Amino acid sequence: MIERIVRIENKLGLHARPASLFVKNASRFESDIKLIKDGIEVNGKSIMGVMMLAAEMGSEITIKIDGADEEKAMKTLVKLVKVEKFDEE
Amino acid sequence: MKNDFILRGIAASPGIIIGPAYLFGEKTTVYRESAGPVKNTDREIKKFKKAVKESKKELEEIRDGLVKKLGFRKANFLDVQILALGDPWMMDETIKKIKEEKKEARQAVFEIEQKVLEKFREINDPYLKERTSDIKDVVKRVIDNLEGGKSMKVSPGEMHVLVADNLTPSDTAQLNKEEVLAFLTNLGGKTSHTAIMSRALEIPAVVGLREITEHIYPGVKVIIDGYSGVVVVNPKEKTLKNYERKKKHLKAIEKKLLGLRDLPATTIDGYTVDLSANVEFNKDIDSANEYGAKGIGLYRTEYLYLTQKRLPDEESQLKIYRDVVDRIYPETVIFRTLDLGGDKIFDNSPVDKNPFLGWRGIRLSLQRKDIFRIQLRAILRASQRKSVRIMFPMISDLEEVRKAKKILEDVENELERDGIDYDKNLEVGIMVEVPSCAILANDFAKEVDFFSIGSNDLTQYILAVDRTNQLVASIYDHLHPAVLKAIEGIIDAAHRQNKWVGVCGEIAGDPLAIPVLIGLQVDELSASPIVIPEVKKVIRTLSLKESKVIAKKCIGFSTSREVRRYLEDIVDTKLTAVRDLILAVDAYVK
């Protein structure tokens, strides 16, 4: 199991479209993917869960991945959040 | 689903109703409360999965079509819905509900939807909050597929409370009115189509609830208090009992008060006001007579213009006005000329962004003289029995009064020429509801025969509150000392010119406000027929002397809270005879 803390840097935070992108990407992997913010843990493959986190710009979320393809999954998701910034800018 | 969820809107039509809700215009059927536990849960789960699959397919087809039309980026707003259908959390929870709680698939879906919506309501981000519409949309699709994709009929086939975002005349045309217990809408004010129609049908209604459709699922029990505008969704047993009690209580009071029918609205020291009725439809006149109203203090003419596609011609108006006059004679009736926004009448008129500051009332009439003249002609022709008065709404400048009176004079001359009889001494008044008119009341009083204070709009304009906006509605209070002070000034100005003053807003039917209005020596009060006995009873226990002291005290306060506290105290200690009547009304939701 691996964990990483990332800061949400896109302007609107994890609103509907970024959340959709996140869930779509997360769903491609076999591993169990969880997101944690302010002590609330949700399923990273659940659009409702991710949206309900209401992670605004500047907030920090923990990505927790457990499974066979955890390394690859983490790389993809962190890239989406930090480097691609959900393709927003 | 949360118990006792309370929403406050605008009380549009009185009465208390408890019944199952039904969302109008949505293709869902009624939730059956006790369908009993499901035996074959596997079958329900299979049904559910199939419905989800079908819904997903439909949505993907729609999205693919949109991608072709709009391009990929713009079409991906449907992604949330598509992803929701594959959402592991929602799927698991729903299946768990079916399996463990033995619920029907449809009901499990409803309950999960409620759970999700409730969580979303806690989110502060307005953008994410809006996604509830996606959730509702997608759930609706699943339910439809669960029902075999068939289109459900408009009416649920049993007595129900009709809940809608808004009701248009064409919507109401297809309603089965026999089955409607009450109306609840997100939009609308006192003169919205729903409000007007519900009063005409004598069906309780609350409008302007902003978000009632968000909190309702088909079949959920709701309490509607059409007196106070309170709606309780999914009430607790205790709340239900309280309302049953209130219902009984009001019935008992009503019965007792009807004994006052033929007595005047006179204080114990001999000060009499004319207690008359606000009327919208001719059939309200029966209620006005039944409840002992002295004439009609406000006849709203808007309905004539809203119900038909064409503008009403002179003859059809005359027929209705004459009927009013005949039914209330020898008492008088005050016809208020058209008080509507232009966007409500003309299809091609741009929607008023700020309707209460917009093109409405006398402003419209003075620009559309053709419409105005027809109405004035009809009213004048109905005045032969000399029991008709006329008043203009939304006056903000003396020029408007002069222009309106000039047009009235023209129409009179025209009738004269045509040899048609009318009342040559007909009294002409204005609604005082705009602050400019209240401030300059002295000048206006010189040029009209009477004032009628429209307290609802006056309060709204003085306090700058849109009371259909839940976020600010609590600031709205017609007992605010600023409003009372304005009313005092208006009455004094009129009396100095020997003109009489009526009050026709909701304040005239608010028992707590009656001592103040009497103390300010108002000459006439006009309220909904149904509250007239109550108001009369209060007046008959007051003395003018005492009321003057009360009014003076209230105007000396600086917040409405102080006014209310003081008045409640007075009622509690001095007006013990009507204490229950006045204070009973809002103590039921606790």
Image: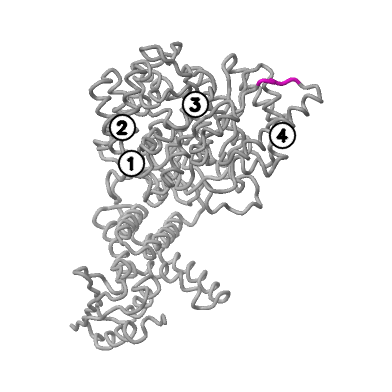
Q: Give x and y (percent) for residue B89.
A: 29, 66
**CA–CA distance between discs 4 and 3?**
26 Å
The secondary structure type at the circle numbered 3 is: strand
Residue topped by disc 1? B232
The label number, if any, that marks residue B502 in the structure image: 3
Residue B330: quadrant of the picture? top right
Q: Amino acid at mark 1?
A: Val
Q: Give x and y (percent) for residue A2.
A: 19, 84
Q: Tell me which segment is drawn in magenta.
A: B421-425
Query: Is the C-beta separation of discs 4 and 3 under 8 Å?
Result: no
**CA–CA distance between discs 2 and 3?**
34 Å
Determine whether A35 is above or below A87 in the image: above
- Circle nearer the N terminus (4, 1): 1
- Circle nearer the N terminus (4, 3): 4
Q: Quick check: do tags 3 and 1 share a chain? A: yes
Comparing labels 3 and 1, the label whose residue is closer to the camera: 3
Q: Is residue B163 magenta?
A: no
Query: Is the C-beta separation of discs 2 and 1 under 8 Å?
Result: yes
- Circle nearer the N terminus (2, 3): 2
Q: Is residue B422 magenta?
A: yes
Tell which subunit mark 1 falls on: B
Q: Quick check: do tags 4 and 2 share a chain? A: yes
Task: Determine the residue positioned at 67% across, 33% down.
Answer: B405
Determine whether B484 is above or below B575 in the image: below
Q: Amino acid at mark 4?
A: Ile
